[in-house]
Amino acid sequence: MKNKKTIIKSANHQIIKFTILISSFLQIFITTNAQSYYPKNYFQSPMDTPLYLSAPFGSLRDNHFHSGMDIRTYEKEGFPIYAIADGFVSRIKVSPVGYGKAIYIQHSNGYSSVYGHLQRYEGAIAKYIKNYQYQNETFDFDHFPDRNRLLVKKGEIIGWSGNSGGSTGPHLHFEIRDTKTEEPINPQLFGIYGVDFFAPAIRKILIYDLDKNRPSLIKKFSLSHNKTSVVDSILVYNDTLEIDKGLIGIGVEAYDYLTDVNREYSLYGMEMYVDDKEYFSYKIDRFDFDQSRSVNVHIDYELYKKEQIRFQKCWVDDGNTIKLYNYLRNKGKYNLNDDLIHKISVCACDINGNSSSFSFYIKGFTNVNHREKTGESCHTTFLYPKKDNQYKSKNVMIDMPAKSLYDTLDFCFEELRERERNSFSETYKIHDQYTPLQHAFSISIKPDNFPEIIQDKLLIAYFVKEGNINSVGGEFHNGYVTARSSNFGNYFVTFDSISPTIKPLNITHEGIVKDTLGLKIKIDDNLSGISSYRGSINGKWCLMDYDSKNDLLIYEFDAQTIYNEKLKFELIVSDKKGNQNIYKKELIFKSKKENSYDKN
């Protein structure tokens, strides 16, 4: 006969199982109802393979939320891509960066679909694009065809998966947008589901002092097994944390997992409670492109810059206007002003209703020195988020439009002592790299002692990691070089008078192209960046694809290619400061049949 403890334990176990089951059904019910106004059976999948994702919708990226789902193509190109419903091609964009070769289709139900990083287009669309490129003598373009020019049917192949543009590996970038507002919407809300087997996991908790003008980290702890236990199926931190009284905020490091526990993905949503009262929640169902840069204030931007880990805030800064947050009590901030013990709970969830929760306890105490401002101040002036701000020193002018800042800024400006090589100004510290901006600001620096001959080559540069510099460009006018930048940092005036480099990759000394598919040429620039290029054969413009991430130009052989004749090829490449390089060569394109010399 079972003893009393065994019976009670068994009963508790059944209650927990029943509670979890009811919670799961409730989650599914809530999720289904919250998403019911999106049509579930209207669209088909853009691919005929299972949708294994390399990045879900809303993933946290540098300076933006990911606006689509990235569908894996197993490190290969050339998978067929299908129109998800009837419609017409409303936009075609070809670019060496961003979405690369992309196509936009408008559907009759108020939504549009986007397909990015394609290898090539298909059928009438491909023919239309090539004709457009030759007529306008351009590889990259952004074009809006007439409404009835390129009609597509549901399930029609519109292109083939690739790795074009800013892609870091072969995949399909797929979006569904609200046609009227252009807001991207999570495709899984429409029944286009990614494969997902695992629940999210919470790794670390951070506690911030929010009494200061700038949030200050006061406690950080991991969910280590030796300090946690499971209570009613919830992971609980065993120790009560003593926190200095005042206004506090909670930060979380958490990840979602899809097909294994080794690949980390961004969350779909999160909730935070204090004493079982909801204080904060968000779900990334849709967002506004104009607000996407607010990802930098959705996370602890300074910690990300220092540690390359995105800790998400469970509170909202005054200047954060992105519409992600389903519920906010006191903007997610909690005023710890008593000596009682309070429970903080965090729940991380995915779009399929899987979730993980964690609770810990805090107790307020008074430590008058803890919240005093520490460290040396570089105070120059205060800048405000809701107004235009200007700052001017002897040699520098800064113009910052309203809504560039997320919060009132104790602005720091310094002239640094050490002058950089090849610079024509001092180096100026414009605040610090750990403070994010929503919009770009204008910076003007007065150069000195520069030869007049290089006046149009002057530009503004700033420091990036490991002492490297990037150009933000700029033009000389009225004694200043003026440019726009979206980042604080250390800036100075330098110049670019070096022409871009041109390096043929598959041309022999005799001018024979050692490839049956096309001509490949590497182009690069030392500082200001490639501005334009033009390739021609026998004086006529030829279409050359530009893969900027690999600094590669490719002329693909097609029906217009002339084989086995000497052809006069010319390539002109210019950078953004007007420096130019010209490559000329007599070439012979060998057809596959004639290219037998390679076998020797």
Image (spheres, rainbow, N blue to C red):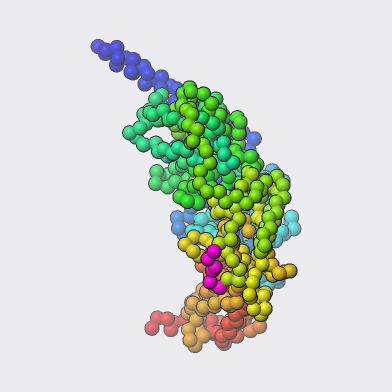
- Residue 531 drawn above or below residue 224: below
**Closer to the camera, 518 or 419?**
419
**Closer to the camera, 572 or 493?**
493
Q: Residue at x 47, y 34 (%)?
A: 355
Report if residue 11 lies within the magenta region: no
x then y, percent, for residue 59: 53, 46
x then y, percent, for residue 472: 61, 64
Report if residue 419 lies within the magenta region: yes
Q: Residue at x 26, y 13 (%)?
A: 2
Q: Quadrant of the N terminus?
A: top left
x then y, percent, for residue 71: 51, 51
* Left or right: residue 386 compared with residue 306: right
- Residue 474 drawn above or below residue 176: below
The magenta stretch spans which residues?
Answer: 417-422
Numbered label tally: 0
- Residue 216 drawn above or below residue 93: above
The quadrant holding residue 242 is: top left
The quadrant holding residue 474 is: bottom right
**Closer to the camera, 174 or 533?**
533
- Residue 224 drawn above or below residue 169: above
Residue 216 visible in this rendered orientation of the protein:
yes
